[in-house]
Image: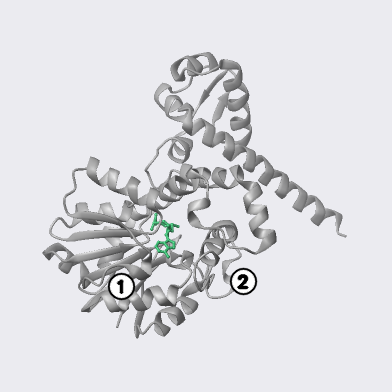
């Protein structure tokens, strides 16, 4: 054994352990509004922050000490005050901005909360249905994906598809399949008022929440339905899309075949999946660690709990996804856009 390598690995893992507990604290700070309060106050003592956020000062002092040690907040020892730099504010306090990582924390906390089920699933090799996860899994997933959709869907991904933006502006029928809490469905309904957007997901509580959000926004051109992806009605959609969900499905080939059948003759299917390379070694980076991690506890068990149980995983890569789409009868598959976290495919018959 190499003592130097052992020391480096130990230091890294201790850093990860500090991060693991740091993320729990960051989530507590999100839920108790510590970061947004600090953002408003600027440099402040623990007494001032505790008073403004209506929190216990002793707990807050311990919390902020850990946060300062982790670099999540800054401590001014001369003044004995804590504050957020603009960068710390962007990551911890600016919910909804692409820079804010609270959605990741929420999704991770949701997994820790039900660690017994995760261990049992892993040991048994049995499927674990999407609906059997902690509520934070649904909210956290929506929260960490949404900023990427807000930043890219309308300005980058749809324009990367041949002629689709014009069609949607003119007014067509859209299907958003595996829509979860409906963030993408809502963005499309808001942007394309002449089109009608149908959101489908087999998880009833997600559809309930999505419908509530659309109603609160007063959207009239949107409908949500509880449905398995293979059962969506044959209504001739001009545009179908799946965002970060095909790999969670048990039968991605069956789903793609069904989409081919429900699309109009010149319809387009836009597939958005987590960014990945074709080989494991291409994905051995921080994003790969995160994606394979969630895939181990969420995506693969979700797929296995369904018929067929193909278990594509969240890092399937373009080659494998093209095989799936080709075997469903789609001959045209073109990667049309990519961001750090997502890849987009234009798929046609
Ligand atoms: C990772 S979430 C993505 C949700 C949403 N598209 C988003 O990007 O926020 C995966 C979604 O796929 C849905 N799902 C998985 N298998 C499904 C199936 N066979 N039919 C319909 N929905 C399915 C789950 O209920 C979940 O909402």
Neighbour class for label 1 at 10 Å: few (<14), some, many (≥20)?
many
Q: Is residue 223 left or right of residue 57?
A: left
Toward which corner of the image does residue 281 lie, by quadrant?
bottom right
Point out residue 169 in the picture as x, y percentages from the top left corner: 14, 62
- Residue 337 visible here: no
Q: Is residue 26 left or right of residue 17?
A: left
Q: Residue at x 48, y 27 (%)?
A: 34
Task: From the image, tell me which residue sits under label 2.
Answer: 281
Mark 1 secondary-structure assignment: strand
Point out residue 242 in the picture as x, y percentages from the top left corner: 36, 65
Point out residue 274 in the picture as x, y percentages from the top left corner: 46, 63
Task: From the image, tell me which residue sits under label 1.
Answer: 269
Which of the image's four quarters has the N terminus? Answer: bottom right
Neighbour class for label 2 at 10 Å: few (<14), some, many (≥20)?
few
Q: Residue at x 57, y 26 (%)?
A: 75
Task: State whether residue 309 is above or below residue 83.
Answer: below
Q: Residue at x 26, y 52 (%)?
A: 186
> In the displayed image of the protein, which residue is found farthest to the right?
1
Q: Mark 2 against mark 1, which lies toward the viewer?
A: 1
- Is the residue indicated by label 1 positioned so its CB lies within 8 Å of ligand 1? no
Q: Nearer the viewer, residue 48 or 117?
A: 117
Separation of marks 2 and 1 at Cα, in angstroms: 29 Å
């Amino acid at each position: 054994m190499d003592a130097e390598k052992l020391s480096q690995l130990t230091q890294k893992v201790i850093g990860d352990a500090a991060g693991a507990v740091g993320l729990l604290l960051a989530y507590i700070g999100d839920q108790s509004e510590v970061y947004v309060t600090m953002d408003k106050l600027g440099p402040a003592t623990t007494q001032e922050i505790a008073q403004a956020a209506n929190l216990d000062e002793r707990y807050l002092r311990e919390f902020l000490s850990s946060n300062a040690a982790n670099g999540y907040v800054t401590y001014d020892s001369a003044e004995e005050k804590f504050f957020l730099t603009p960068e710390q504010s962007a990551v911890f306090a600016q919910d909804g901005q692409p820079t804010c990582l609270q959605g990741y924390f929420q999704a991770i906390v949701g997994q820790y909360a039900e660690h017994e089920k995760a261990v049992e699933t892993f040991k048994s090799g049995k499927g674990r249905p999407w609906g059997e996860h902690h509520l934070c899994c649904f909210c956290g997933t929506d929260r960490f994906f949404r900023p990427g959709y807000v930043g890219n869907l309308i300005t980058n991904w749809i324009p990367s598809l041949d002629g689709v933006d014009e069609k949607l502006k003119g007014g067509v029928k859209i299907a958003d399949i595996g829509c979860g809490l409906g963030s993408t469905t809502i963005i499309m309904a808001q942007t394309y008022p002449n089109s009608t957007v149908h959101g489908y997901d087999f998880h009833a509580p997600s559809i309930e929440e999505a419908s509530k959000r659309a109603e609160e926004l007063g959207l009239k051109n949107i409908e949500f339905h509880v449905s398995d992806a293979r059962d969506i009605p044959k209504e001739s959609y001009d545009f179908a899309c799946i965002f970060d969900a095909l790999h969670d499905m048990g039968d991605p080939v069956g789903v793609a075949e069904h989409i081919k059948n429900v699309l109009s003759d010149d319809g387009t299917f836009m597939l958005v999946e987590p960014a990945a390379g074709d080989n494991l070694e291409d994905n051995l980076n921080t994003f790969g660690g995160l994606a394979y991690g969630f895939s181990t506890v969420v995506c693969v068990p979700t797929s296995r709990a369904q018929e067929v149980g193909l278990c594509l995983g969240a890092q399937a890569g373009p080659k494998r996804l093209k095989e799936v789409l080709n075997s469903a009868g789609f001959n045209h598959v073109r990667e049309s856009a990519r961001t750090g976290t997502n890849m987009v495919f234009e798929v046609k018959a």
